[in-house]
Amino acid sequence: MKTAKSLLSDSSARAFLGAQALSYSASAAVPVVISFALLDTHRSALVVGKVLAATDLPFVLLLLVGGAIADRFSRRVVAVVSEFARAVLLAAMAMLVVSPHFSASSLAALGAAWGIARAFFAPTITGMTPEIFAEDALTSANGYREAARSLGNSGGPALGGLGVAIFSPAAALAFFALIYLVAAFWLRTMSYTQVSREVVSKSFVSDLRTGYREVRSQAWCFITIVVYSFMHLLVFGPLVVLAPVILKTHHLGGAAAWGILGGVEGLGGIAGAALASRIKFKRPVWTSSAIALALAPALLLLAMAAPVAFMVPAFALEGMGFAFIGVNWETAMQRTFPLEAMSRVSAFDIFGSVALYPLGQVLGGAATAVVSAQAGAAGTAIAMVVLSGALLSSKSVYRLTARGIELGKTT
């Protein structure tokens, strides 16, 4: 296992982190490219919401299966196959959008297949982390992982938006198909000794029950997952539809502007990840959740259709806030739950958090038929503050201390 000192001096550690940055960039870009491919062909916001929901619903539904499989088999193989499958599917999307037979339903079908492949990647990568890095390096490793995620979340939307604006949606999709292939190759070149994991269960159902029992045994973990499920329904899901509509209809720069905002958000995340890997909070999840309230100003400025230059620093602060949550959350989970169940626990975490995300995307599109996209964005800002307040008022989240995690007292 890699220690804190050897974190970036080892080629396998660099490959692991670099592949994630590439994968996250492609995954963050796909919704941006799909949104503008549909808007540019005069599809409505509701159609955009439905297609995006179709790409994410299979991801949500199969996350638990992905986590169970990753705990049973080689996590690296599962991750590589997922990357390769998504590369093929993006290439197919690129051909579809330039085809005379292009339709929203066809794009949704390919997006659904892309979501299925993605469901196997997310819990697998989280489970691989404590296999590769020693416990004393987990916080630093998760800091680098969060930086990789932020780099992907900045580079992906920026390149996706600029690719659509300068070239075409098809060219952008083809480019990110190549990115997935490079990520798959990078993961394939890793050399590390996989930790032996005894598979006691004889069925996937039993595997899933074990994962659920682990999550349910930790009140702070279960409550946070529930709160973030509603955040995806009322904030993140609607926002992915409402933001492109606002930027396009108010002539604020459209795809290029959304790419720029995604880029600065990611850069803020990189800075936040660097700080979070060095700053040790007494109450890691509670404090980082408070910092994440920095999202609210960005949503309010978007609701006001403010100039993009005004939104840039707000989106940077947003990225920084969520980086603190990512680093502290994953470190707490990896130090609390057993390694042999880590991918299943991660799958329940992601599933619970994003289960309502597809419905939120449809909700965002439907909202534009009742109120303006700006009013919808204002609603997401209010929901963000209310839900964050609910999380910060949780006694179990507040009582979770870094010292308690070290001693195994996290219930």
Image (spheres, grey):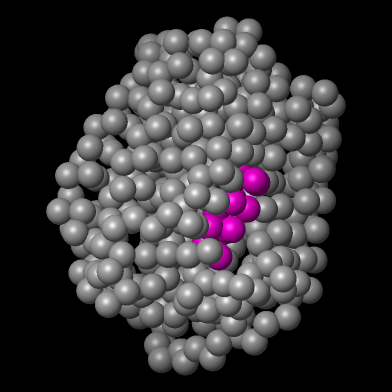
Q: Position of residue 201 (x, y in %)?
A: 40, 88
The reply to whether the magenta stretch includes residue 335 is no
Q: Position of residue 148 (x, y in %)?
A: 63, 53
Locate the N terminus by quadrant.
Answer: bottom right
Q: Residue at x 73, y 80 (%)?
A: 191
Q: Position of residue 323 (x, y in %)?
A: 48, 47
User: Is there any visible trace of residue 169 in the rendered image?
Assistant: yes
Count up the numbered dots: 0
Q: Position of residue 218 (x, y in %)?
A: 24, 67
Q: Residue at x 17, y 44 (%)?
A: 393
The reply to whether the magenta stretch includes residue 148 is yes
Direction from residue 400 to residue 127 in the image, left or right = right
Asked if residue 365 is positioned above or below residue 219 in the image, the reply reads: above
Direction from residue 405 to residue 101 in the image, left or right = right
Between 211 and 41, the residue placed more toward the observer is 211
Q: Quadrant location of residue 8? A: bottom right
User: Is there any visible trace of residue 229 in the rendered image?
Assistant: no
Q: Which residues make up the magenta segment?
A: 141-153
Between 116 and 289, the residue placed more toward the observer is 289
Locate the C terminus by quadrant.
Answer: bottom left
Direction from residue 72 to residue 294 in the image, left or right = left
Between 385 and 142, the residue placed more toward the observer is 142
Q: Looking at this view, name the residue that lies furthest to the top.
A: 250
Between 157 and 39, the residue placed more toward the observer is 157
Main secondary structure found in the magenta portion: helix
Q: Residue at x 33, y 45 (%)?
A: 289
Q: Residue at x 67, y 14 (%)?
A: 253
